[in-house]
Amino acid sequence: MTERIVVGAALVDRGRLLAARRSAPAELAGRWELPGGKVEPGETPEAALVRELREELGVAAEPGERIPGQWPLRVPFVLQVWTARLRPGSAAPAPLEDHDELRWLTPAQVWDVPWLDQDVPAVERVLAHLGLEVGPR
């Protein structure tokens, strides 16, 4: 089976990371993740990231660099994470699809929310890659 990419956005603003709380499906509801979604056939991961952030959060975003590594999700999906920033004039992020709450977390607050298990190593890598001081986990 061919590996399918799910893109996650490390959306950072003023040293804070955006986290999104899942509202669906039921087995993931209430847990937190990096926003994003599946790359569609014929779509680049960067284009998928821009599309997913528009659909899920109502924002105009610009992809940055890919965070090294990838993390297994349910077969055949793997999570890859890119940095991203809001374009000038973008709306503020809002939980439009599959999420019921968003939070901008400072490095000291990052572990205050229950992340999805598969997002934990990705968030750790994001913080290390961006050189953000991490609070105790």
Image (cartoon, rainbow, N blue to C red):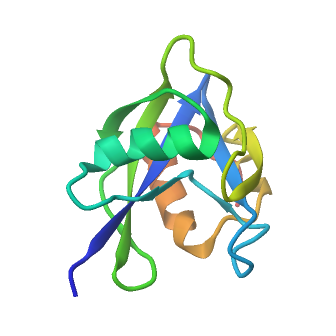
From the top left corner, tell me how far across and down residue 43 is, in percent. 25, 51
How many marks overall? 0
From the top left corner, tell me how far across and down residue 116 is, in percent. 63, 70
Residue name at image x 67 percent, y 33 percent: 93
Whether residue 66 is visible here, answered yes or no, is: no
Q: Is residue 84 left or right of residue 101?
A: left
Q: Quadrant of the N terminus?
A: bottom left
Residue name at image x 37 percent, y 75 percent: 77
Above-or-below relation of 123 to 74: above
Q: Is residue 23 left or right of residue 33?
A: right
Q: Between 39 and 81, which is closer to the camera in this rendering?
A: 39
Above-or-below relation of 3 to 112: below
Whether residue 96 is visible here, answered yes or no, is: yes
Snapshot quadrant of residue 41: bottom left
Snapshot quadrant of residue 95: top right
From the top left corner, tell me how far across and down residue 84 is, in percent. 44, 34
Q: Between 1 and 112, which is closer to the camera in this rendering?
A: 1
Q: Is residue 120 left or right of residue 131?
A: right
Q: Is residue 70 left or right of residue 44?
A: right
Q: Quadrant of the C terminus?
A: bottom right
- Residue at the limit of the structure toward the top, as seen here: 89
Residue name at image x 43 percent, y 42 percent: 51
From the top left corner, tell me how far across and down residue 46 is, in percent. 31, 42
Above-or-below relation of 106 to 109: above
Residue name at image x 64 percent, y 22 percent: 91
